[in-house]
Image (spheres, rainbow, N blue to C red):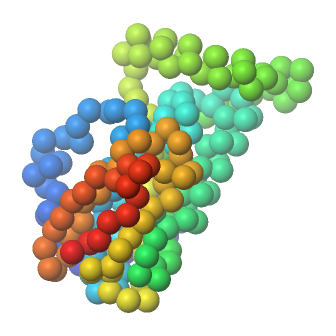
Amino acid sequence: MTPFRFALSLPLLCLTFTAQAAEGLGAHVHGEARLQAAIEGQSIDLILESPAFNLVGFEHAPENYAQAARIAETVQWLESTPLLSGAGCEITEASASHTLTEHEHGRDADHEETEAHEHEHEHEHEHEHEERGGSHAEFEVSQHLSCDESPLASEFGTLLFDRFEALERLDVEWVSDQGQGATTLTGDQTRFTAE
C-alpha cells in the first residue's frame, strides 16, 4: 500500500491534536471511536481509531475461518468506503491496520464451530482476556478523500453506524485553515457540518 502523502494537512492535524495526544487517547471503551479530519482545499485526510470489538466483535486473534474472514471483510470495507460522505468526496488512498494477531487453524470442516457456539466462545474469551489484563486490540484507518467541492460548510454523514452495530459513539474532530471543530455522532445523529 502506498504511504500517505498528507502534504500540509497532516502537519495541521498533528499540531492541532498534539495537546490531546499528550493527554493520551483516553480509555479503551467498547462502543466508542474517534475520527480526525484535516481539510485542505478540496481534500480531506482522515484517521479513524477504534477498538477492534466495535468493528469485528472480538479483540483476540482469529480462532477460526469465520473470524479471519470477518477481519478481512472489515479491512476491505474500511479501505473502499469513505468514512465521511458528502461534498462529492471519493477515496484516492486508504489503509486499514489492526493489532489482532493471526495464527493457523486446521482445515477440517468437522471442527467448524456453529455460530451460537462461536459467539459464546468469543464472550468467554473476552472475559478471560480482561481478567488476565491483556492489551486491547485496535483498528486504525487512514483515508485521503478528494472532493468535487470544498468540504468546508458541507454536510457530511457516515455509514459507520449502519455497518458496525457495536459502534455507539463517534467523536469527530476536524481542522482546516479556517479553524477547527468537533462533534459527537451516534446512530441517531450521523450527520454534521464542518464549519
Coordinates of residue 139 in the picture (x, y in percent): 45, 45
Q: Residue at x 64, y 17 (%)?
A: 120
Q: Nearer the viewer, residue 142 or 122?
A: 122
Rendered image quadrant of residue 138: top left
Q: Is 64 situated above or below 189?
A: above
Q: Nearer the viewer, residue 154 or 49?
A: 154
Quadrant holding the C terminus: bottom left
In this picture, residue 25 sits left or right of residue 67 = left
Q: Residue at x 18, y 65 (%)?
A: 181
Q: Is residue 24 visible?
A: yes
Q: Is 65 situated above or below 72?
A: above
Residue placed furthest toward the left: 19
Coordinates of residue 7 in the picture (x, y in percent): 29, 78
Q: Residue at x 61, y 34 (%)?
A: 102
In this picture, residue 169 sits left or right of residue 58 = left
In this picture, residue 45 sits left or right of residue 163 = left
Coordinates of residue 112 in the picture (x, y in percent): 82, 24
Coordinates of residue 64 in the picture (x, y in percent): 72, 29
Q: Is 14 situated above or below 151?
A: above
Residue placed furthest toward the bottom: 149
Q: Is 101 situated above or below 152?
A: above
Q: Residue at x 55, y 33 (%)?
A: 57
Image mark count: 0
Q: Is residue 3 visible?
A: no
Rendered image quadrant of residue 28: top left
